[in-house]
Each structure stands twice: as structure tokens, then as C-alpha cells.
Amino acid sequence: QVQLVESGGGLVQVGGSLRLSCAASGIIRSSNTMGWYRQAPGKERELVATIASGGSPNYADFVKGRFTISRDNAKNLVYLQMNSLKPEDTANYYCNLRWTTWRAYDYWGQGTQVTVSS
């Protein structure tokens, strides 16, 4: 089984920064994509950023220039550095691990709350 554990959420003022971390454990295929999604109350879960094991990041338009995703393949860790935070960034942030063989395998963390106060 694969487990994902997020940390680093919290309360921050507008313009502040937070760094989220996610540790993956279990039997993990070496070629995979890790990422962050978020879900605000009353809204659907949306992609924030992903990064493949080869290192290619992908960002949602609303975080480009503010958030940076990175990973440590040797330790199965993924990070999300969030700068210039806005009230609309308030959400529960979920870590995701995905790989595809003959089907897609998706694993999720329990989520970490980020609240940006104005």
C-alpha cells in the first residue's frame, strides 16, 4: 500500500509564504508524477501543480510565478513553496501520487489546510 502524509499547512496573512511537504511511503513505481491539488468549501478539487519523476513541473495558471513545486526522488518527497499568498488560495491542499501501467494508479493524502487571512 502507498501512503501519503502532508504537512506544513496553517494560517498566514495575505502576501505571506508557506511550504507544504508530502512524504510518500510503500511500494512506489519509480516513474511517477507527484502533485498538489486543492479544494475550497463548495468547490471542486483542482490541480495546483504536478512534477514528474523526470523533473518536469506543471502549474495551474493561477499559481504561476507564485508557487514552486519540487521533489526529492530518493526520499519520495514533494514540496510546494507558496509565496505571495492570497485569500483565494485558502483551501485544503492534497498531495497526489500517480503512475500508469495498463491503468492509472492514484493515491491521495489526507489533506492539509491552508488559510490566508486578509
Image (cartoon, rainbow, N blue to C red):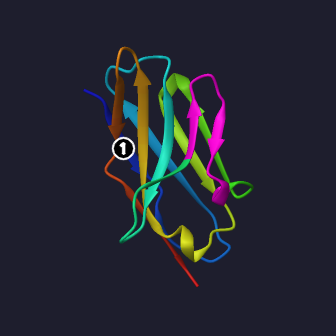
71 up-or-down from 101: above or below:
below
Q: Residue at the location (42% across, 40% down)?
A: 96
Tag 1 residue:
5
- Crowd rating for badge 1 (residues with CA inside 10 Å; few <14, some 14–19, many 20+): some
Q: Quadrant of the N terminus?
A: top left
Side (left or right) of 22 relative to 48:
left
Question: Which residue ends up furthest to the bottom in the rendered image?
Answer: 118
Q: Residue at the location (75% across, 55% down)?
A: 65
Quarter of the figure with residue 79: top right
In reply to whether residue 61 is colored magenta, the answer given is yes
45 up-or-down from 21: above or below:
below
Where does the magenta region start and end?
A: 49-63
81 up-or-down from 115: above or below:
above
Question: For numbered disc 1, what is the local secondary structure?
Answer: strand
Q: Quadrant of the C terminus?
A: bottom right
Task: Residue 117: give x, y in percent of width and height.
Answer: 54, 81
Quarter of the figure with residue 23: top left
Count how many numbered circles sit on residues in the image. Answer: 1
Task: Residue 49: give x, y in percent of width and height.
Answer: 57, 46
Question: Which residue ends up furthest to the left in the rendered image?
Answer: 1
Q: Amino acid at mark 1?
A: Val
